[in-house]
Image (cartoon, rainbow, N blue to C red):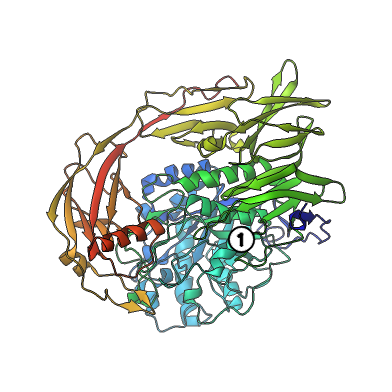
Amino acid sequence: MSAAARARVRADTAPVRRPAMGNDIDARPGLEVTSAALLRDGRPWLPVSGELHYTRVPRARWTERIRLMRAGGIDVVSTYVPWIHHQPEPGPPDFRGGLDVAAFVDAVRAEGLELVLRIGPWAHGELRNGGYPDWVQALPVRHRTDDPAYLAVVRDWFGALGAALDGRARPENILGIQLENELYDQPDHIVTLKGLAREAGLSAPLWTATAWGSAQLPEGEVVPLWGGYGDGFWVDPDQPWDDTFRAHFFFSDRWDDPGIGADLRATEVAAAAAASELFPRATCEVGGGMATAYHRRPRPAAADIAAVAHAKLGSGSAWQGLYMYAGGANPTLGTAETQATGYPNDLPELSYDFHAPIGEAGRVAPSHAALRLQHAVVEAFGSDLATMPTTFPDVAPAGVRDRTTPRWAVRSDGTRGFLFVGWQQPYEPLDDLPGIRFRVETDERTWEVPDRAVTIPAGTLACWPLGLTLGGVEVAWATASLVTVLDGVADAGAGAVPTLVLREDAGIEVRAEIDGAVRILRPSMDPVRVTGADGALDLLVVPAHLAADLWVVDAATGRRRLFLARDELTWDPTGTVSVRTEAQSPDVLEYLPGARRWRRPVWSAPVGGCTATVVPEQIRAGMTPDAGGYGARDSRHTAPDRSVIDAQAAVHRLHLPHSVGADATLRIDWAGDIAQLRADGRVVADRFWDGSPFVVDLDDLGIDPDTDLQLWILPLRTDAGIHLPADAAQRLASAAGDGASALCALDGARVATPGRGAEKDAAGGR
């Protein structure tokens, strides 16, 4: 047994504190705030929040997106309230249509999810002026301070927002309000903003503020919120993978991050801020993806997105907050962050896809599945996890470049717990880690996991149970990751028998100590029943290659259910499941714990989708851009303006098939620098190339087969010097090796029209 694989769990002697916020002030019946966790109806609650910007998603899609979020395990929706979208010019703010924030609040609450409003007034969010309208940015005031002239303008804005919400922003209806964003040295100003918000009729049980960058926050007035990204666009194009990104692939008790927003700070962070003793460790910006800037274009893989979130959960997070969770697009041109407005980065004018679990077009990415598995664990076991402190091993990695020391942590109350293993990172892939066992010692017992040494394969993100008792049977440990638990169903021979659902961790033999005996469990679609002296338990170990297809209907619907589907599933607040498929028929199975078998749901109508090839017609070839690029600001490339694209882009007319149906998506595989879709001459969507396909929803953009739809692709010089993902960089280098001075290609395009249906019989014979 290596000393590196030992952890000693000691009793948590820190007193649990009960702040005034959310308890004595702005209280909501049934909600309690402590220094250890939030509680709902007396039970610890570990929220999982995801960011969705209502102004960046068509209003007709709000409920659909919210349901996709819920299907991913999100129970709190957070959103910026972008001032620049509501009041681009002086005069009455616009809260109509897709800007109707009150209607958005109603949509979230109607689906049974909680809501956090991030009201700023400065937001960032890769918005122009950080979200200030140009006329506010131009005012002769000291922005983001208690300058009376500035406060007068903010008072008017908050007042208009409060009037638009019309009493909806109250403790009974919304969970939290975030003030400002990335404000580091103005704690009194945050208190002032809180007062202005109250004056406008806005209040919530939780008031929050971002704490990274050693932010000075007013103690007790706001819950400090942390973040972490595994990669980012805010460093220079030639900079290697930064240590501030590397750190988030390790379990750690350090919550501050000096990297987020560093390119907008005037000074370096001197020391990491300590976590609050009044409030639990909470996050609001664990990277659910990453935005694309012109000079640097990260494209985080699903495994890397999941690895960062996994590390936060294992490190003691009492609130998992993902940014972004649902991507979108700016409602108008001219509201994105640009160098022209004094910021260091150029972002696409419209697209804010963010490589999020739910993309700009409303389709789920592989990260939705990777995170969905984590969130299923939180939904099933969060009331235990929420108050369990984290213990780190005796021998921890020797810094963020350590590639040989196991990365693991334990959350335990001394009698039971969860063992987290994380062995995944980008850019510099890890080697398999042989000869590993974990020894967890508490005052009550010791677990040695597993009973013999194993190899931890690269890519492992494991959450193993310790001392878990269900149905009268104890699973002392298992080398398969938790997924969920399905309620016991009456059985003539064994009474109510619950089902513990585990997933195989690829490359690790599934062994478990159950009621004192070590067993080998074969991953299978069929359950194994274990009978002990005090009861029985079904164990369902899902094979690793099927894990990404698991969907868990949350218990808040009245009954937790398990599905296996490659298609997208959503459900309404009653738990009625709907499917969206691009295949000829859905491929969905539901597990019935009572019958101990799988069944195919019956849909209310025949469901099937179809795909068709889009025929392109080249109108004009692209021109190789001049050497030297389009300028730079502080070593970061400047994006070309519209006139350059007009003059030099290749132009293709896309002829859509007349068979295109409702809710169709257009997928374009391409290569180059910048792509724009123009519908009847208007720019309706754009992308900076990073090797990923350009996907849009045709209905959202008002495109039909009669639209004059053109794809404009600006060639990318092979010596451009921008940062690209490895596969895109290789393609650009190959073009250079073939003697080309620029890369510009339309590889293909297709349209997919989905089929949709709701289940006909949700009961299904449990």
Nearer the observer, 186 or 613: 613
Q: Is residue 93 visible?
A: no
Nearer the observer, 203 or 454: 454
Amino acid at pointer 1: Arg
Q: Picture coordinates of residue 345 (x, y %)? A: 38, 71
Nearer the observer, 624 or 201: 624
The residue identified by callout 1 is: 403
Q: Picture coordinates of residue 459 (x, y %)? A: 56, 50
Q: Secondary structure at mark 1?
A: loop
Left or right of 137 in this view: 426: right
- Taking the view exactly as shown, the residue that stands out farthest to the left is 619
Q: Is residue 177 visible?
A: yes
Nearer the observer, 365 or 185: 365
Which quadrant of the view contains residue 535?
top right
Left or right of 170 in this view: 569: left
Q: Picture coordinates of residue 558 (x, y %)? A: 61, 32
Q: Tell me which residue sits at (69%, 59%) in the image.
A: 280
